Amino acid sequence: MSKIHIPTPLRQFVGKQAAVEVTGATVAEAMKALLTEHPELRRHLYTEDGKLRAFVNVYVNDEDIRYLQKEETAVKDGDNISIVPSIAGGMA
Amino acid sequence: MATTTTEIPVTLNKDEILRYSRHLIMPEVGMEGQQKLKAARVLCIGTGGLGSPLALYLAAAGVGTLGLVDFDVVDYTNLQRQIIHSTADVGRKKLDSAADKLTAINPYLNLRTFDARLSSENALELFREFDIIADGTDNFPTRYLVNDACVLTGKPNVYGSIFRFEGQASVFATEAGPCYRCLYPEPPPPGLVPSCAEGGVLGILPGLVGVMQATEVIKLILGVGDPLIGRLLLIDALGMKFRELKLRKNLECPVCGTHPTVTKLIDYNQFCGMRGEEKSVSSGVPEIQVEELKRRLDAQEDVFVLDVREPHEYQICNLGGHLIPLNDLPKRVHELDSSREIVVHCKMGGRSAKAVEFLRQAGFTKVRNLAGGINAWSDRVDPRVPKY
């Protein structure tokens, strides 16, 4: 089992949880497990042709998967997967 | 634009030595560090949630030249977190209010205020007059503008961002480090990520993140410690957890990569998919004005009022409408009767416009958006309804 950390703006789609436990040997498998359980998340994370959106970054532990094997990056038991979207707030 | 500070050797007078004594007795700052602070020129973009603590601490710490860019006016909803402004400042320009506090804290401060919206036309010229840029803005177009202008002028971008009880901080656009576009090449499409005004923000959070930005600014000036270059700090105030992610310079980055495609500032509103401000408030769906709704309700006409805000907003104030939060609408649409006339409202008209669009696509024909939302109702029909 690994843990996927859900950022605040997306928690409303996963029953307000901060993290979701999933099984999967790769990032793609773990994300698939997440989306099977919480299908409403899909449009926020993936484009219509199934690509991870450009303003959503995925990390395994503290590494950006873009610099590992992307969605084929291996995930071990106990790894932390983080979804990190851009947020803009500050002034208003 | 005012003239730049000239390179005179910086010295501290007796009063300043006393004022900065707790810095001067630390070896990490000392006289040399304090002189570096005095010689430094820092530009804060925005004097809001992040800008407030940032500017206050930088002024107190003895940063010599502080620039502030803002065009906004203080309102009551700012006071919960924008601690540089006080109740008596409501209605004043944020720049004037901030200038009073900052010069009261430190009369030695050379404060430079720019009463303007940062834009592709003024950013480069402005940034060139400063050493470090601190980004305390609240929207994607300005975030990308600040980043690109920092890369193009070679100034570090001390970044902080907040949402509800979560924050991010980093230092972008240093010579060796990544920039904001290395992390996020493109902004989210409008409407997918809620803004602070829609999503809310815990008042202390910009305090926490703004002080982190101030810390990073001071470290960059002093050249001490380990700055947040190549690291993204994630702050979760509810769990009080701090996590750190590695950031890498993206060689294919459109601005700071090896073959940049962005070599001058662009139209950032267009880049972020929006034209002008608050476009969503009137997005072409059929509308009804608050006065007309009031008249029809008073005449007991058959109008079904649908409120698409969140339950906690309904608790603040409501028009007695049927509550279905926008996100729940697809799965609860069966609660609505398409033969009846429906008026949809939210706080300001943005979310309800989306709901109207959705309902029309779902086959509802007698559905209209309440222009300006419950805030307009409060302004123009019933001032007893609180605004938030």
Image (tube, coloured by chain):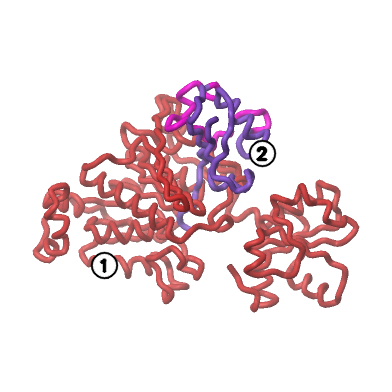
Q: Which chain is purple?
A: A
Q: Which quadrant holds residue B247?
A: top left
* Residue at x 13%, y 48% (from the top left corner): B27
Vertical arrangement, residue A87 with respect to residue B211, above or below: above
Identify the subunit bearing mark 2. Answer: A
Disc assigned to residue B114: none
* Residue at x 50%, y 21% (from the top left corner): A69
Question: Which span is picked out in magenta?
Answer: A47-72
**Percent x, y of residue B121:** 44, 48
Q: Which quadrant holds residue B314?
A: bottom right
Q: Secondary structure at mark 2?
A: loop
Q: Quadrant of the C terminus of chain B?
A: bottom right
**Percent x, y of residue B183:** 45, 35
Label 2 is placed on what type of residue?
A: His
Residue bearing mark 1: B105
Can residue A62 be found in the magenta stretch?
A: yes
Q: Secondary structure at mark 1?
A: helix
Identify the subunit bearing mark 1. Answer: B
The answer to whether residue B132 is visible is yes
Frontmost residue, B233 versus B217:
B233
**Percent x, y of residue B47:** 40, 60
Label 1 is placed on what type of residue?
A: Ile
Residue bearing mark 2: A38
Q: Quadrant of the N terminus of chain B?
A: bottom left
**Does the residue at mark 1 contact the one at mark 2 (Cβ under 8 Å)?**
no
Q: What hue represents chain B?
A: red
